Image (cartoon, rainbow, N blue to C red):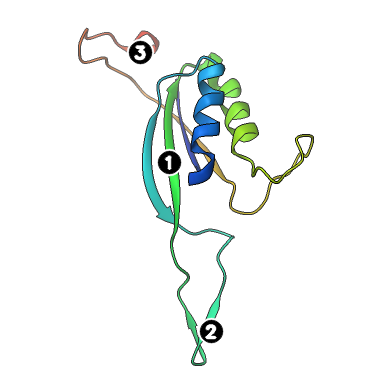
Amino acid sequence: MKLIIAIIRETQLDQVREALIEAEITRITVTRVSGHGRQQTVEIYRGKKVVPNLVPKIKLEIAVNDDFVDVTINTIKKAARSNDQIETSEHGTIGDGKIFILPIEDCIRIRTDERGTKAI
């Protein structure tokens, strides 16, 4: 079992969500977050560097069984790339996001007390 965390642009949420549903991945958690990465711009104000503004983003958390890890990652990558990219392009643009994969030790469904892969 893995926990997939994806940070994507706000504008790509609907596209990513629809692609995940089409790939039969329907259980997701969505959170509005803010931060900055490589897309930051350094501003100089009165001769001093100014801390860059935080950019609004979306964080997706998806718990999947091991069989669905690659499908989930590939679906997110394809759907989260900026719309201005040609469909055959292998690379997106700075700010398209990140995907993190973490192991899940256990999962418990509260309603039925099921554990492990059945609970996901």
Q: Are marks 2 and 1 in contact (CB under 8 Å)?
A: no
Placement of the C terminus among the 4 image quadrants:
top left
Question: For the residue carrying disc 2, how many other residues have a C-alpha within 10 Å: few (<14), some (14-19), or many (20+)?
Answer: few
User: Which x, y percent locates residue 40?
Assistant: 55, 65
Placement of the N terminus among the 4 image quadrants:
top left
CA distance for labels 3 and 1:
24 Å
> Seen in the image, is 112 located left or right of residue 102?
left
Amino acid type of the residue that numbered disc 1 sits on in the rendered structure:
Lys
Amino acid type of the residue that numbered disc 3 sits on in the rendered structure:
Gly
- In the rendered image, the vertical position of residue 83 relative to residue 20, given as above or below: below
CA distance for labels 3 and 2:
52 Å
Q: Is residue 9 visible?
A: no
How many badges with numbers are in the image?
Answer: 3
Give the label on residue 44, or none. 2
Give the label on residue 116, or none. 3
**Residue in view at x 22 percent, y 9 percent:** 113
Eye-nearest disc, 3 or 1: 1
Classify residue 82 by image quadrant: top right
**Residue in view at x 53 percent, y 84 percent:** 44
SS category of the residue bearing label 1 = strand
User: Which x, y percent locates residue 38?
Assistant: 59, 60
Disc 1 target residue: 59
